[in-house]
Image (cartoon, rainbow, N blue to C red):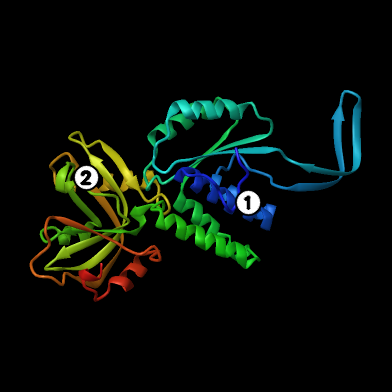
Amino acid sequence: MAEVGFFPKYEQKENRVTNYTLLVLKQLYNESPKLFQEFMVNLIKNDEHNIDVGVNFWQQKGYECDNGKSILDGVITQSAFTIFVETKLSDWFYSEQLNTHLSNLTKIEGKKIFLALCNFDGQKSDIFEKFMEEYKSATDIIFAYFDFGNFVDILKSLKQQIKTEHLTTIIDEFEEFLYNENLLPTWKYRLDVVNCAQTKNFVKTHFAYTCPEAKGHYKHSRSRYFGIYENKKVDTIAEIQGVCAIDKNDKIEVSWWDNDNCSEKEIIEKTKNLLNKIPDYRPIQVFLLDNIRDGVNFFKDSTGGMFGSKIYFNVDNSIKNIDDLFNTLHNKGWNNY
């Protein structure tokens, strides 16, 4: 065990990442306990539970016991809480370790919080989801899991309230560190360009792209953006809200969705509304699109057409939305990327 510090002696990458993460939180707390509290509330996103950080001052506060009731002129209190943080560099949470952590956490007095930090890359951790469900009714522990991207986004949302330039610099450098270590969700900076020469009108009319639910060239890595390829260029881009798989019985299963901008329920409802419009072969996967932009002219500046049915482009992490992507790719050649 070691105190969090600026010069960690850990050799394992996971331990170093944890140290830097806790160090940022320590600096945030030193800036302001209430700012740290706001960060935790935004991170947990649990309406039923809250966390109170720092000292509270009360006047004329009453207490009652077997000997009677007393009114104190002044009371200074500080609520107890313990936060367990489990950090992974990949989505590899396993039940045995989680059970041990939770057993120990339940024995601690005060408010108990368990946070799982990982590069989920936008995917849900099935084992962690199952684990949370099992413990939710059995304990008073607050559960939350999040990826490094969520962590940084919440930190950056507090920047305007931070008064010291030192801390804002630390947050910027922490984000750069995570990006260089490939710990930010890669899907948020990926453009999936697909050959839609035969289906372009359908895609733009129904805001949906379909292909067989199969392995090989029909398998798509999760991406935030979708590009329609035709005649050696991408002239239309869109944001991917989510992807669903539909089996032979028209059962819909959500593969993933952009939970920052929509819900799983919305994705299912939109897919249901498309059932009588999409091709009737099964199984099939459906990409639900939004915020379509035309006139991009992101062109292939080498001889020949696109090799294969799709190609991926990784864009800079400074691109935050579809308009940023449009401005970056507008009238540019593929060789730039």
Which residue is rendered at x = 23% and y = 54% of the image?
208
Q: Which of disc 1 and disc 2 is earlier in sequence? A: 1
Residue occupied by mark 1? 26
**Residue type at mark 1?**
Lys
**Secondary structure beneath label 1:** helix
Residue at the extreme left: 304
Which residue is rendered at x = 27% and y = 44% of the image?
244
Residue 10 point in image, percent of width and height? 51, 44
Q: Relative to 55, say whether 96 is above or below.
A: above
**Residue type at mark 2?**
Gln
Res 278 visible: no
Residue occupied by mark 2? 285
Q: Quadrant of residue 124?
A: top left
The image quadrant where one finds the N terminus is: top right
| Foreground tag (2 vs 1) | 1
Which residue is rendered at x = 55% and y = 29% of the image?
102
Neighbours of disc 2 within 10 Å: few (<14), some (14-19), many (20+):
many
**Secondary structure beneath label 2:** strand
Residue at the extreme bottom: 331
Res 249 visible: yes
User: CB atoms at circles 2 and 1 under 8 Å apart?
Assistant: no
Which residue is rendered at x = 33% and y = 73% of the image?
327
Residue 309 in the figure: left or right of residue 53: left
Could you tell me how far apart the alpha carbons at marks 2 and 1 are, in whole angstroms?
44 Å
Residue 329 in the figure: left or right of residue 153: left
